[in-house]
Each structure stands twice: as structure tokens, then as C-alpha cells.
Amino acid sequence: MTELEHQVFSQIRAIIANEEQVLGRRGILIPLKKAILADGDVRNVVDIVSSDPALAAHLLWRSTTAHVGGAHNSKNRSLKDALIRLGQVNIYRYAFSFYLKERLDELPQPYKKLVLGYWRLTESIAASAVDSLKDLVSNNIDPDEVQTLALFSVFGQMIALTAFAYLNAESDESFPLGIIKQIIDTQQQTLTLEAFDSLGLDEELKEEFMIAHNLRQTRNPNSAGLVLRRVLSMRGLLLNPL
């Protein structure tokens, strides 16, 4: 790593460590996380989600996408029904990804175009991973866990590119895109795991991400990470190739 790349890498890591700067809007996520951790009445979670109609509509949509063609292929009659079926962990992951996408939409060009390319990739990976469940003869894998995990498949790349956009916007000098490309190509694992820790995502998501990228092994046949690993391997996206 050159001296300039090391300088940019250090600054990007500092930005990633500041969740407010990276994610921006935390108004819903903070009370939502507190309500989920309190493991209280689902009505509290429903009230929080309902306070943002766009998020509520998104969760209603997400609550059906992972189960198309399956036993749960029916529209939830209410937001409460949808949230109960999704489960607390998936609610927070979906909400986080929703607000992250909002943040990405606000980035200036050319970063917006590049980072939304990563976003489209994650949606494609998620669809493929959920679709692959049909080929499993018998499993107890939650399709929503597979889908929420898949939405973080290239999380480190998205966050690093977002941080780089903020760095260039605030810096007196403009760093070329080639620098962030080199950093992403060589430091994906570090950037990704630091992003998971800094942004307050659940530990199980981080563990399954590591399984998905062949950075950790498991004997759990119902691991969502193992399902995703096959998809990532076929696409040549594993951090640690098989």
C-alpha cells in the first residue's frame, strides 16, 4: 500500500467508525433497536415502524418477497402480522438496509452510480440465494434470514465507497477513484468487519457473513451462510475462495 493509499485507508476507517456520518438518519433505528432488545410487546415495534410510512410499506413488501412460491406465499393482512412473521432480527436488518439505501440515493455522482451498482448486485444475490432454497430437499432455513444476510453480501464495498465519497466532499484535495478501488480490492475483509462492528448490527449477521465468505466454518446444516456461500462462490465473490 502506498503512503497515499494508507492515508486514505485510515481516513475511511475513521469515517466508518462514525455511524451517524455513514448512515445518517438514525431517528427510527435507535428506538427500534431498543424496543427489539427489550423483547417487549410487539405493539411497541409496530408503533415505531408505523411512524415512518415508507419503512412500514417496505417491510410489508419484504415480508412477502422471500416466500414467493412457498407455504407463506400470501399477503400479510396487517403490519403487525408481517412483523410477527419476520421476527425481530430480520425486522432490524431490513430496516437498516432500507435506511442505508436511502443514504446511498443521496450520494453525489459518480459515487451514487457505483454504489447503487453494488446495491443491485446484492438484490440479485438475495434473489438467487432465496431461489436456491427450492432445491434443498429438507431444511429449516428461514428464507428471510437468507435474504437479509444476502443484502449484506458486499456490505464492506458499499460502506467503503460511501465513506470515500464523504472524504472527497470534505477534503481540500480530491482523491482519484483508483485509490478506493485498490483499497476495496485489498482490504475488503477489514473494512467489512469493522463496518459490522461500528454500525451496531447483530453478531449473528456478522458470524453468518463470515461463514458465507468461507472465513469461518460451521456444522449447522441450517446455516443461512452456507446457502449464501454457494451463490457467492458461483459468482466469484467469496472473500476466501473455495
Image: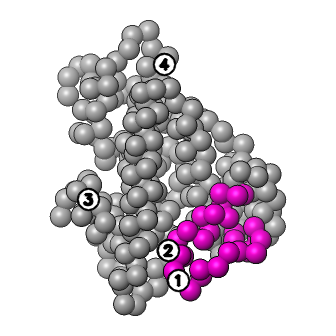
Inspect this view and state whether residue 212 appears: yes
Q: Relative to the observer, which residue lies in front, 5 or 14? A: 5
Q: Which residue is mark 1?
A: 70
What amino acid does circle 4 point to?
Ala
What kind of element bears circle 3? Answer: loop
What amino acid does circle 3 point to?
Arg
Q: CA distance from mark 1 to mark 3?
A: 25 Å
Q: Earlier in the sequence, mark 4 or mark 2?
A: 2
User: How many marks do you count on the picture?
Assistant: 4
Q: Quadrant of the C terminus?
A: bottom left
What kind of element bears circle 1? Answer: loop
Tag 3 and tag 2, C-beta contact below 8 Å: no
What kind of element bears circle 2? Answer: helix
Inspect this view and state whether residue 84 appears: no
Q: Which residue is mark 3?
A: 235
Q: Relative to the observer, which residue lies in front, 179 or 210? A: 179
Tag 1 and tag 2, C-beta contact below 8 Å: yes
Label 4 neighbour load within 10 Å: few <14, some 14-19, many 20+: few
What amino acid does circle 2 point to?
Pro
Q: Quadrant of the N terminus?
A: top left
The answer to whether residue 24 is above or below residue 199 is above
Q: CA distance from mark 3 to mark 2?
A: 20 Å
Q: Earlier in the sequence, mark 1 or mark 3?
A: 1
Q: Which mark is residue 143?
A: 2
**Segment colored magenta:** 56-83
What kind of element bears circle 4? Answer: helix
- Is 1 included in the stretch rendered in magenta? no
Q: Which residue is at 70% across, 74% downward?
A: 76
Q: Earlier in the sequence, mark 1 or mark 2?
A: 1
Q: CA distance from mark 1 to mark 4?
A: 46 Å
What amino acid does circle 1 point to?
Gly
Q: Which residue is mark 4?
A: 169
